[in-house]
Image (tube, helix red, strand yellow):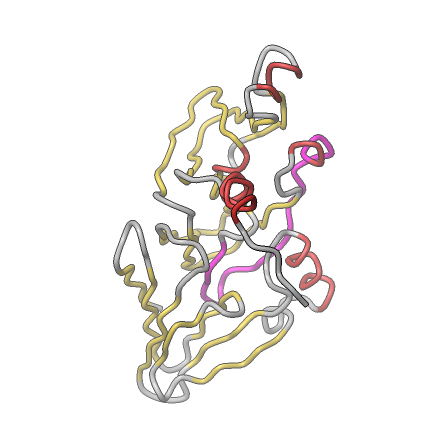
Amino acid sequence: MEIELLHRPGNAAARITLKEGESCTAEAGAMIAMSGNMGIETTTHKRGKGGLLKAVKRMVAGESLFLNHFSVPAGQGEVIMGTTLSGDMMEYELDNESLIVQGGSFLCCDSGVEIDLGWQGFKSVLSGESVFWLNLKGSGKLVVSSFGAIYPVEVDGEYIVDTGHIVAFNETLDFSITKAGSSWLQSFLGGEGMVCKFKGKGTVWCQSHNPGSFGWAMSPGLKQRRA
C-alpha cells in the first residue's frame, strides 16, 4: 500500500495506491473517488479480526459502525479519501507496536493493522471529551487525520495536553486525566476543564483546533431545523 498525502496542511486528502493482493480498511464515508477497477466491501469489522462487538466498541469511541475494505482484483488501483473537518493528515507505520488514536481521527490502515478500543479512565467522563480511544496495533501503514494542523510533541518526562487537541500518542507513554489549574474551580472557569498528563518517553501528536470547542462556538448561530 502506497500513501500520498495531498493539499496539506489545511485541506488534506489521502491517495491510496493498491496492488493486486493488497487491501486497505477505511472509515465508512471516507472515500472521495476511486479507480474503476477498485473493489469495495462493507463490513462491521476487519476481515478475520473480530466481529460485531468490536464494531460497537468503535462506534462508542466516535468512529463509524461500519468499515469499508478496498482491494484490486488485478493490476493496480487507487482510492482518494478525505474527512469531514478541514485539517491535516499523517502517515504512520507500525512495527509490531501500538498507536493510541483519539476517536474520530482514524482514517485508514492496511491489512496488518488491528483496530481495538482503549479506555481513558472514569475521570474523563467529566471532561466533556471522548471517553474512549482506539488502539491500533500490529505491523503496517495507517493514516490519521486532524482538525487543523497536526504536529508532534516529544515527551521526555511530563507533558500536559488538552484532551480535545490530542490526535494520537505512542503506547510507551503513561497518561492520567487531571485538572488543568491548581484547583477545580480555576480549571473550569479558565475554560480548560480536564487535561491529559503524559509521563514517560514518546510522542504525542496534537491538532491545532478542538472539534468540541468549535461545535460549541458554532451552535448559537445555527438555525433550528424545522420538521
**4 sits left or right of 111 in the view:** left
Residue 93 at x, y percent in the picture? 39, 53
Q: Main secondary structure of the magenta part?
A: strand
Q: Residue at x 36, y 79 (%)?
A: 34
Q: Nearer the viewer, residue 108 or 202?
A: 108
Residue 169 at x, y percent in the picture? 48, 39
Q: In the image, is residue 114 above or below residue 169?
A: below
Extreme residue in the top direction: 182
> Residue 119 in magenta?
yes
Q: Nearer the viewer, residue 26 or 2?
A: 26
The region drawn magenta spans 106-124
Q: Quadrant of the C terminus?
A: bottom right
Residue 167 at x, y percent in the picture? 47, 43
Q: Nearer the viewer, residue 33 or 141?
A: 33
Q: Nearer the viewer, residue 57 or 104?
A: 104
Residue 108 at x, y percent in the picture? 46, 62
Q: Residue at x 63, y 28 (%)?
A: 177
**193 sits left or right of 24 in the view:** right
Q: Residue at x 31, y 86 (%)?
A: 75
Residue 156 picture quarter: top left
**97 sits left or right of 82 in the view:** right
Q: In the image, is residue 68 above or below residue 35?
A: above
Q: Quadrant of the N terminus?
A: bottom left
> Residue 72 in magenta?
no
Residue 131 picture quarter: top right
